[in-house]
Image: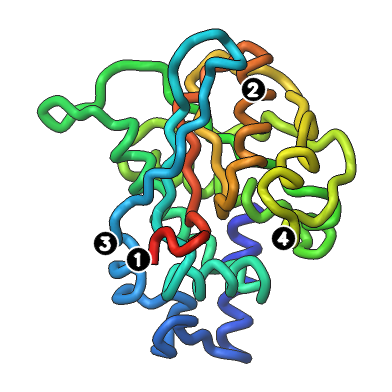
């Protein structure tokens, strides 16, 4: 029902104020097919893995993969989605994320995925401030859309909002790496555990402090986090230029 209402609302909005691509200005879609193909074609960014050593004693890492660097067209698209209220952009973004996840999780044999528990996608939850400013938890909605897109593409996946925010945190944007870690230390708790591989979804990775806390909360609750997947990794200190 919600999807149908959104679709009708989107169509009515297009009659009053037709969309154009936020990247190239072509009429028709918030991100045109040509620009979306360029986003999909860029190489995946491998971020620093999150060690399980201090959480479980196992000398392994949770891989962190981003669909690209937060520069150029991808930066433009994400800003339009997050900061300028163009929520329809969630659809090309979910297709972008689903490609990264499918490449990581799908080990196809003769075109068929192996029998295994379907992964659960869970978002790093928005703070109350972010949810209020944007009207919803846009990353959680992105995770839900991505799970549906994966299913459409033949990769079984589910979506569940596992984490919750336990306290107020300061705005991270102007904090350094050490202050970011301290700011979000212990900020997440688990609503309810799931007995399936977990993929953590986020929008932008900067220092990794927030995703580390999310993985830590899930791991301490006994869940197996297999990957963190985000839309973009921030360019810092010249890396990625």
Q: Position of residue 5 (x, y in %)?
A: 65, 63
The residue depicted at 38 percent of the width and 77 percent of the height is: 32
Label pair 1/3, CB-CB below 8 angstroms = yes
Mark 1 or 4, closer to the camera: 4
The residue pinned by badge 2 equals 218
Q: Earlier in the sequence, mark 1 or mark 4?
A: 1
The answer to which of 157 and 2 lies nearer the viewer is: 157
Q: Position of residue 29 (x, y in %)?
A: 44, 78
Q: Is residue 155 left or right of residue 226?
A: left
The residue depicted at 70 percent of the width and 53 percent of the height is: 176
For residue 206, above or below residue 113: below
Q: Position of residue 70 (x, y in %)?
A: 48, 64
Q: Earlier in the sequence, mark 4 or mark 3?
A: 3
Q: CA distance from mark 4 to mark 2?
A: 25 Å
The residue pinned by badge 3 equals 41
The residue pinned by badge 1 equals 39
The residue pinned by badge 4 equals 173
The residue depicted at 46 percent of the width and 54 percent of the height is: 94
Label pair 4/2, CB-CB below 8 angstroms = no
The colour scheme used to paint the residues is rainbow
Q: How many marks?
A: 4
Q: CA distance from mark 1 to mark 3?
A: 5 Å
View extreme (top): residue: 57
Q: CA distance from mark 3 to mark 2?
A: 32 Å
For residue 24, above or below residue 129: below
Q: CA distance from mark 4 to mark 3?
A: 29 Å
């Amino acid at each position: 029902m919600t999807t149908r209402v959104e679709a009708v609302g989107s169509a009515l909005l297009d009659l009053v104020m037709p969309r154009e691509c936020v990247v190239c200005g072509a009429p028709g879609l918030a991100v045109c097919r040509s620009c979306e193909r360029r986003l999909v074609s860029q190489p995946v960014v491998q971020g620093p893995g999150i060690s399980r050593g201090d959480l479980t004693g196992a000398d392994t890492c949770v891989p962190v993969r981003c669909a690209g660097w937060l520069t150029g067209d991808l930066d433009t698209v994400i800003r339009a989605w997050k900061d300028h209220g163009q929520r329809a952009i969630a659809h090309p973004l979910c297709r972008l994320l689903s490609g990264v996840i499918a490449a990581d999780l799908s080990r196809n044999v003769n075109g068929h995925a192996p029998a295994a528990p379907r992964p659960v996608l869970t978002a790093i939850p928005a703070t109350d401030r972010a949810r209020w400013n944007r009207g919803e938890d846009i990353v959680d909605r992105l995770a839900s859309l991505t799970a549906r897109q994966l299913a459409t593409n033949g990769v079984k996946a589910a979506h569940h909002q596992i984490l919750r925010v336990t306290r107020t945190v300061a705005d991270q944007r102007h904090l350094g790496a050490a202050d970011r870690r301290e700011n979000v230390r212990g900020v997440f708790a688990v609503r309810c555990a799931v007995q399936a591989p977990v993929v953590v979804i986020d929008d932008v990775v900067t220092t990794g402090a927030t995703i580390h806390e999310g993985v830590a909360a899930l791991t301490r609750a006994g869940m197996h986090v297999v990957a963190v997947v985000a839309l973009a990794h921030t360019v810092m200190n010249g890396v990625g230029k």
